[in-house]
Amino acid sequence: MPRAQRAYRDGMTAAGDTWPENIEVRPVGGGEIEAFLDVFETAWGFTPDGEQRRRTGAVVAGESLLGAFADDGMAGTVMSFALELTVPGQVQMPMAGVSYVAVHPLRRRRGIMRELMRYQFDELHARGVPVAGLGASEAGIYGRFGYGPATWDSTWRLARGAARGLADRDSACCLELVDAPAALELFPAVHEQARRFQVGDVRTYPGRWHDLIGDDRHRGRHFLLCRDDDGRPGGYAIYRLEREDRYSPHAAVIVDHLIACTDAAYRSLWAYLADLDLTDWVVASGRPEHEPLRWALADSRQPTAHSHRRPRSPVGTAGRSSGRAEPQALRG
Ligand SMILES: CC(C)(COP(=O)(O)OP(=O)(O)OC[C@H]1O[C@@H](n2cnc3c(N)ncnc32)[C@H](O)[C@@H]1OP(=O)(O)O)[C@@H](O)C(=O)NCCC(=O)NCCS
């Protein structure tokens, strides 16, 4: 029995084999986006959701989508968003935000992802994109392609009251709770301003704001805006309250996103979040491993990093054999 057939029978494929199918990797055309999303949803086992799918279709349309086509249709997907990465010196560098890596469950371990990755690297290389980044679903997948961990993010937990006095009254910014449409209008510009000064941060991919802020289906999220003395938005936080039961005085403030352009905004946001009535804790995820908050508190031992510290946004080079990019810290 030929090697590839034996491998298929055993459910494995030796490196380089693409048997048993002829796989062609090529750009996905406008009329093939439904098939692209079908493969992606099946690969992840998502329950089809018409509204979510419509939105996703709109987000990916116009980006660089690739499909791996077998004789009977699309079997694998990958795409890249055209992002921008802040590197030292506040220089902006083009970065491919690689996403939608998926292979149909019946066609796995036959080298389809490898073919997609190879084609994508070649394409990025030809376009002169120097760096690619992604968030890996599983740690073991991407090292073989030249990706490596860029940084780690942490979840920080702070007891209520521990940040009291953090924002000095004279320099405290003006805080405002806004609704979702206002958050959608104002927050992106705040992030865009902040990320240009944060090495490793990236321009957010289209659609992320909807994920973070959402619509009516995301009730329960609160949107805290911080304005400076001139009324300009200078920071924000997106948070939720997880209460034991409706009238319980015990709740955790769950911070999903916090961005501040100034020290005053940073202090004001944390001081508010860590002193809400009827709460015990603030828990903020997706934060930098070296959250500066610690050093601003009277008791620097108060904030504790949760155990599920995890790697964030591996980064690799887009060239095939040009060696590894220096890992850059990516912050959400
Ligand atoms: C991950 C996935 C895309 C892999 O596709 P695939 O076509 O089976 O991968 P390939 O056959 O091209 O594998 C290439 C190499 O990666 C390895 N590999 C594949 N999936 C892996 C995994 N989950 N963990 C570790 N290694 C993996 C293969 O063993 C092979 O190794 P080799 O270099 O020693 O030959 C596919 O399993 C999938 O769709 N998973 C669910 C969705 C997902 O997790 N996507 C990734 C999002 S970040």
Image: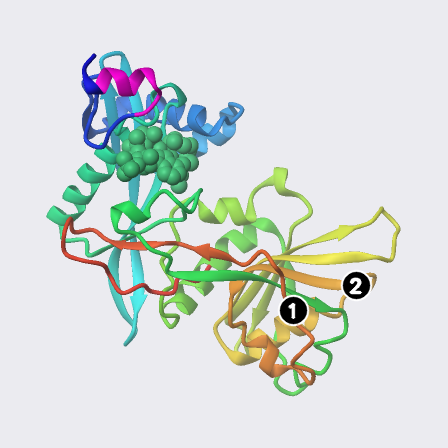
Quadrant observed for ligand 1 in the rendered image: top left
Report the amino acid beneath label 1.
Thr
Observer-side mark, 1 or 2, equals 1
Q: Which mark is residue 289?
A: none
Report the amino acid beneath label 2.
Asp
Label 1 – label 2 distance at C-alpha: 14 Å
> Is the N terminus in the top left, top right, bottom left or bottom right quadrant?
top left
Q: Earlier in the sequence, mark 1 or mark 2?
A: 2
Give the residues drawn in magenta, as a range.
Answer: 4-12
Judge whether residue 136 can be spotted in this image: yes
Q: Name the element at disc 1.
A: strand
Q: Which mark is residue 280?
A: 2
Residues under numbered marks 1 and 2 in contact, where contact means CB atoms less than 8 Å apart:
no
* Residue that label 1 marks: 304
Judge whether residue 59 can be spotted in this image: no
Crowding around mark 2 (Cα neighbors within 10 Å: few <14, some 14 to 19, many 20+) is some
Q: Main secondary structure of the magenta part?
A: helix
Q: Is residue 128 above or below residue 162?
A: above
Q: Residue furthest left?
A: 126
Q: Name the element at disc 2.
A: loop
Tell whether 179 sits left or right of 43. right
Residue 18 at x, y percent in the picture: 21, 24
Give whichever of 182, 193 is nearer the camera.
193
* Among the 4 quarters of the image, the one containing residue 201: bottom left
